Amino acid sequence: MRLISVDEMKQIQVDILKDIHQFCEANNLHYTLIFGSLLGAIRHKGYIPWDDDIDIAMLRPDYEKFVASYSGKNGAYRIYDYRNDVDYHHPYAKVADTRTILEERTSMKDIGINIDVFPFDNLFDTKDECNQFIKSLDRFKKKFRIKLVKPGKKNVWWKRILIRLAKATQIFWSMKKITEKEYEIVNSLSNENAKYIGVAVDPEIGPAYRSVYPRTMFEKFLKVPFDNEEFMVTAEYDAWLTQMYGDYMTPPPAGNRTSPHTLSKIYWLD
């Protein structure tokens, strides 16, 4: 087993994104860096120093075309989608390097080093309608997070007990069933010209609410530096980042500069 450092993992993620970027350009699909990756690109011209993943997003029609047709140029990259993979249950896609394994402290089967691909769905013409719709999905988001979390040694004893008790309340729900139920509601959306779009399927309710933005977000794009490469961002990055994070150009206090992810072990499949 050859272990992979976090810095090497980040380079593998950038290589995946380079391949996705080339695929999207060749197939007239539009994407933007999103969430912490968009923030990192604007504030740090690359990764947020204490972050360790890459997120991109597409409008739902381009997202569906991408999920249906993407194939990595070198044969090592594979797309994961809950509809096509029996052990993958996230409500958004991932593209992973199948030569690697990224172990995470969750209840889902580990896959390779990957990047996240989120869909922006057409929502409604008012923010109140958008928020009410996202609120209707929260019961599924809570169920999914309970099923996903895995009690471990890093949790104090009483927290491990609480996690197990919470998981016991969801014994009759599988993660795949939860995602399918959430998508039954999301698939009811029908206004292709809705004023607002958003990442309705984000597993976290807060980011789902704050992602809601006018559809003009996907009308113009810029190419910006990210580490030693250049990738696409929405031209309206400033307004979107301000809505998502507030004063996004000011880094958080030193004590809060930690990764939110649950990485355990990263290695090559030899």
Image (tube, rainbow, N blue to C red):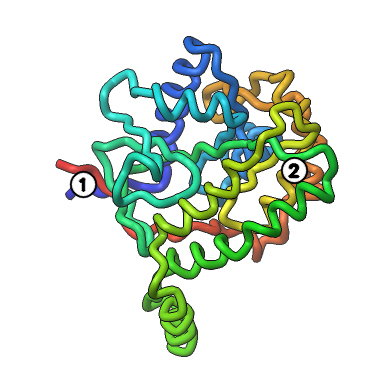
Q: Quadrant of the C terminus?
A: top left
Residue at screen point 51% across, 37% down = 117
Is residue 8 visible to the viewer in this orientation of the structure? no
Give the answer, above or below, for where 167 lies relative to 15. Answer: below
Separation of marks 2 and 1 at Cα, in angstroms:
42 Å
What amino acid type should be assigned to the residue bearing mark 2? Answer: Val
Residue 210 locus on image (x, y percent) = 74, 49
Residue nearest the viewer, comparing 38 with 166: 166
Residue nearest the viewer, comparing 149 with 14: 149
Residue 34 locus on image (x, y percent) = 63, 37
SS under mark 1: strand
**In the picture provided, is 212 more to the left or to the right than 67?**
right
Give the residue at mark 1.
2
Residue 157 locus on image (x, y percent) = 43, 88
Give the answer, above or below, for where 11 lies relative to 253. Answer: above
Q: In terms of sequence position, does the residue under pointer 2 or pointer 1 come before the other?
A: 1
Residue at screen point 61% across, 42% down = 188
Give the residue at mark 2.
212
